[in-house]
Image: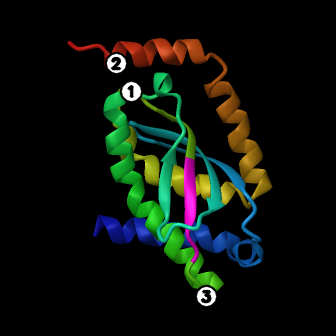
Amino acid sequence: MEELRYSLMGIEKLSTITQQLIEWDFSELYGIGFYRGHDKYAHIEIKVYPTDANVDYLHWNVIHALLPNQEIKGAQDALNPYVKFIGNYLSAIKNKRVNLVFEIARVGFSATDSWTKACGTAYIDAFVSAFDQDKFNRAKEISDLYFADETQIRNAVNSANKPW
């Protein structure tokens, strides 16, 4: 049931950019998405471009000093269904199979919450923002503030990576 709810949310958000998706020439895109809910926070920045591979996939290009090691596997597992979902949605609109690389450029999460709980919504918002300049500009302002002091983030991640 949870998966159906997220699929409907994804369709609703992607439907706002249907015409742009139809017209997209597969040039590289850059998007930023956020999710903030009760006790949940996620931030994700992605690059999207076509691939000759026969599958859509994630490519992690994240500075590991900014993401705790224990979060990467969970984040990959959480995002893979969204990668497939967006790839299938786009292929249906284009009426041909399209394979994309979703390069994860930056991520953020609440230190008191699992990032994976909110990442799907942020991920879809990042993809949508690549086609919606107003949404992208608002997200960029937040992102610039979040990453203004990467030293502080690195220190927090280093603390999280230390064995207890």
> Is tag 2's residue or tag 3's residue first in the polypeptide sequence?
3
Q: Marks 3 and 2: in contact by CB < 8 Å? A: no
Q: Is residue 142 above or below residue 52?
A: above
Q: Residue at x 54, y 39 (%)?
A: 61
Residue designated by label 1: 68
Q: CA distance from mark 2 to mark 3?
A: 45 Å
Going by the image, does 53 lie left or right of 2? Answer: right
Q: Is residue 75 magenta?
A: no
> Is tag 2's residue or tag 1's residue first in the polypeptide sequence?
1
Residue designated by label 3: 95
Which residue extends farthest left? 164
Tell me where the magenta segment starts and ends, as one range: 98-103
Q: Is residue 26 above or below residue 108?
A: below
Q: Is residue 136 above or below residue 146?
A: below
Q: Nearer the viewer, mark 2 or mark 3?
A: 3
Q: CA distance from mark 3 to mark 1?
A: 39 Å
Q: Main secondary structure of the magenta part?
A: strand
Relative depth, front residue between 162 and 61: 61
Q: Secondary structure at mark 3?
A: loop
From the image, which quarter does the N terminus lie in? bottom left
Which x, y percent locates residue 137? 77, 44
Residue designated by label 2: 160
Q: CA distance from mark 2 to mark 1?
A: 6 Å
> Is tag 3's residue or tag 1's residue first in the polypeptide sequence?
1
Q: Residue at x 59, y 85 (%)?
A: 96
Which x, y percent locates residue 84? 45, 67
Mark 1 belongs to which amino acid?
Answer: Pro
Going by the image, does 69 lie left or right of 103? Answer: left
Q: Is residue 14 above or below residue 135?
A: below
Q: How is the image coloured?
A: rainbow
